Amino acid sequence: MDWLPTSYVPGAELRWLRSLLRHRAFRRKMSTAVTNRSWSEFRKRDIKLGVNLGTRKGRKLAISLGVFEVVQNMELLEVVERQIGEIEALLRKRYEGLNPVRLMMTIPGIGFLTALTLYAEICDIERFPSPDKLAHYCSLVPRVHSSGGHTSMDKETRANKWLKWILIEAAWSHVSFCPDGRLAKVFHEAYRRKKDKKKAIKIVARKLVNVVWGVWKYEKGFMVE
């Protein structure tokens, strides 16, 4: 009789993909934490090292300094970076040809891993009849409270934190890639009003939801303005 509300449950393949992408995100956070910890050790010893610890050459040079804590950090970083590489190779082998992923990659600032994360978390664009519905699911729509003729805005609705995170990251990249584009103008206008870059980029992320929805829904690549 359709009296009971239903909730969407992705298939086994999508659940596995979500898990693997979140596992990779955890590994990337671990890599960043270890790298930052190593730079902290350098600062304590007033060591100035102009290298990228994300490369083998940079890690090798850091190890050659003989700082015990840094040596262990570099050994751990080597393992984590190798694991991240293995995960990304597997993802590319299995999912690089997906049509929604290829379509979303036409949007400046959205690369393969970002597009794949959006695909894994959204699953099926037909679940969302409008960009507004998708934006709510992405936790990018503030709550509205009305009382006694007074209306106020609260924190965003809580739904999918992973989508919110990846869309904000994509928004930063898009503004960087298209400094003269429409969304960059939205960012600068929002920053002028709110004096807060984090709040401004959330507004851009909300607008980016419209772009993602349209590109995926209508299967048309993004056209640069």
Image: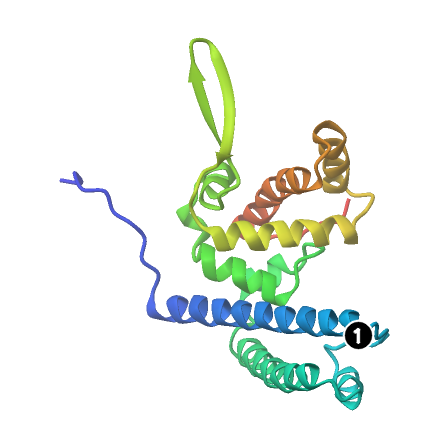
- Residue reaching furthest top? 149
- What residue is rendered at 58% in x and 77% in y? 88
The amino acid beneath tag 1 is: Arg
- What residue is rendered at 34% in x and 65% in y? 11
Query: How many callouts does the rendering have?
Result: 1
- Residue reaching furthest left? 1
On the image, the x and y values in percent for residue 7 come to: 29, 49
- What residue is rendered at 70% in x and 74% in y? 38
Which of 122/216 is in front?
A: 122
Image quadrant in which you'd find residue 157: top left
Q: Residue 197 vs residue 61: left or right? A: left
The answer to whether residue 100 is visible is: yes
- What residue is rendered at 50% in x and 41% in y? 135
Q: Which residue is mark 1?
A: 45
Q: Residue 3 vs residue 36: left or right? A: left
Which of 202/225 is in front?
A: 202
